[in-house]
């Protein structure tokens, strides 16, 4: 793999408080038996990496609101960048279930770490592979897959979140290039990205995809600070002032909103799996704590109300596991619809957030400390609930799908 840019990525030796990861996987309905051998191999490889590289440091990074950029190299090495992109283009060449499993294991470590990988694979590599020219694929994808190059995805704007069609970022034809103006907001990886896949309207009002490269005059990516959620993930803006974009940087094989929406479906699919990982981590911690913490002469796990919480948590996790697995089967058959993906994203993220809240109660006061992962997951999931489509927007997508009536307008 190409050498990383040391000015952008911190030294791998930088560490703070080290913690031991005691996580044990929970599979109440034996969903593992539905997986192929290579799915399990991928799961174990990513789980081992998370336990060794993410869990020992993530609480410290989250507390300091600092992104562990040194992990980008490891994410590339374990195949987390574009797992379902063909190997000839720098991806993993695996199926959609493997992609989901990898996202689940990463989010078990931290939602921000999963976001780092999800953006790189689903929102940068995927559109270049799906909608780009062969020249663009060969130029960018191998570097993105190896982690030599980091990307971000520019769709959301300061005044246009749930309604991307209202975007005001625009391009104007100027001979052999376009002039790009506008701004994007809440962009994961933006301050450290080498390229940005940006969506803008042309002079006829059609939405086009562009590859904007770091260093282009008039392009900046300031970091967003003071976040209470996804604190270990780096977030920024994308600002464009008369940026000259060569026409060879336009994605040639898509026009309209279907381009960015296809990317969002890919990312939402990964979130539907990923959120289960956060829920599993909270449940595992709560189960262990309830067996070890003694009150009134017996472990917390011996009380009916604690057992009620734990039973309901594992029930909802199991339902989400089955929902994600079936969605993965459909995705492998190219039959997973955007509405089905919306249902899974909405259900599984809310499930994970509710599991985190119940786990926090079981931990009592210790649940708000960084000795346990609960509060970090809970804060992260508040963001996951509203990005890549808010909880309510996904509800309306399902509503429109089952009624045939558009409630958005």
Image: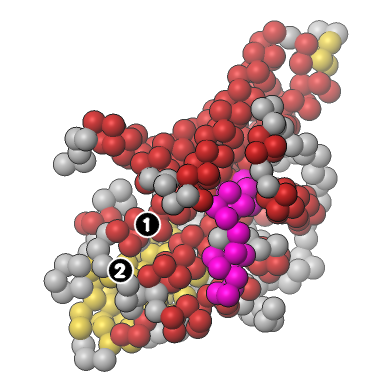
Q: Secondary structure at mark 1?
A: helix
Q: Please state if 73 lies on the left or on the right of 118 as rendered.
A: right
Residue 369 forms part of the magenta stretch = no
Residue farthest left in this picture: 204
From the top left corner, tell me how far across and down residue 3 is, in percent.
Answer: 69, 81
Q: Which residue is mark 1?
A: 262
Residue 311 percent coordinates (x, y): 65, 18
In-front residue for pair 264/353: 264
Residue in view at x 69 percent, y 14 percent: 307
**Which residue is painted at 26% across and 36% down in the image?**
400
Is residue 100 located in the magenta-colored stretch of the structure? yes
Q: Is residue 210 left or right of residue 145?
A: left
For the N terminus, the quadrant is: bottom right
Figure quadrant of the C terminus: top left
Asked whether residue 210 is in view, the answer is: no
Label 1: few (<14), some or many (≥20) within 10 Å? some
Give 206 or 137, whichever is nearer the viewer.
137
Residue 91: x percent and y percent?
58, 68
Residue under the image location 72 percent in, 49 percent down: 37
- Check disc 2 and report its element: helix, strand or loop: loop
Write the start and end of the magenta stretch as one range. Answer: 85-104
Q: CA distance from mark 2 to mark 1?
A: 10 Å
Q: Can see residue 31? A: yes
Instruction: Kindly give the residue lying farthest to the bottom in the view shown.
Output: 176
Q: Which mark is residue 162?
A: none
Lower sequence index among marks 2 and 1: 2
Q: Quadrant of residue 252?
A: bottom left
Mark 2 and mark 1 in contact? Answer it, CB < 8 Å.
Answer: yes
Dividing the picture into quarters, in which one does residue 374 lie?
top right
Query: In the rendered view, would you say 386 is above or below 28?
Result: below
Q: Quadrant of residue 359?
A: top right
* Residue position for label 2: 254
């Amino acid at each position: 793999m190409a050498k990383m840019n040391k000015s952008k990525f911190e030294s791998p030796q930088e560490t703070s408080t080290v913690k031991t990861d005691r996580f044990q996987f929970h599979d109440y309905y034996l969903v593992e038996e539905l997986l192929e051998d290579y799915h399990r191999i991928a799961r174990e490889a990513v789980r081992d990496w998370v336990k060794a590289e993410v869990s020992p440091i993530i609480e410290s990074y989250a507390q300091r609101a600092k992104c562990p950029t040194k992990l980008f190299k490891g994410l590339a090495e374990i195949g987390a960048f574009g797992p379902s992109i063909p190997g000839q283009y720098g991806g993993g060449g695996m199926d959609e279930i493997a992609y989901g499993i990898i996202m689940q294991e990463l989010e078990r470590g931290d939602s921000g770490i999963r976001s780092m990988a999800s953006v790189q694979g689903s929102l940068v590599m995927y559109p270049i592979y799906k909608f780009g020219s062969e020249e663009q694929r060969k130029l960018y994808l191998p570097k993105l897959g190896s982690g030599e190059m980091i990307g971000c995805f520019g769709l959301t704007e300061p005044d246009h979140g749930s309604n991307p069609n209202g975007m005001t970022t625009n391009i104007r034809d100027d001979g052999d290039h376009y002039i790009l103006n506008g701004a994007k907001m809440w962009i994961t990886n933006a301050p450290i990205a080498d390229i940005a896949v940006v969506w803008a309207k042309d002079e006829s009002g059609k939405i086009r995809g562009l590859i904007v490269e770091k260093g282009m005059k008039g392009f900046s990516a300031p970091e967003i600070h003071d976040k209470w959620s996804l604190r270990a993930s780096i977030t920024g803006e994308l600002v464009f002032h008369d940026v000259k974009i060569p026409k060879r940087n336009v994605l040639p094989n898509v026009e309209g909103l279907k381009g960015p929406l296809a990317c969002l479906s890919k990312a939402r699919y990964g979130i539907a799996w990923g959120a289960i990982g956060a829920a599993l981590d909270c449940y595992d911690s709560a189960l262990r704590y309830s067996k070890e913490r003694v009150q009134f002469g017996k472990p917390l796990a011996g009380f009916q109300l604690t057992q009620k919480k734990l039973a309901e948590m594992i029930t909802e996790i199991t339902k989400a596991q089955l929902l994600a697995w079936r969605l993965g089967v459909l995705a492998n058959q190219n039959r997973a619809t955007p509405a089905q993906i919306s249902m899974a994203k909405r259900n599984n993220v809310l499930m994970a957030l509710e599991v985190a809240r119940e786990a926090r109660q079981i931990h009592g006061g210790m649940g708000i400390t960084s000795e346990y992962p609960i509060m970090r997951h809970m804060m992260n999931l508040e963001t996951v609930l509203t990005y890549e489509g808010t909880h309510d927007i996904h509800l309306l997508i399902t509503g429109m799908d089952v009624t045939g009536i558009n409630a958005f307008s």
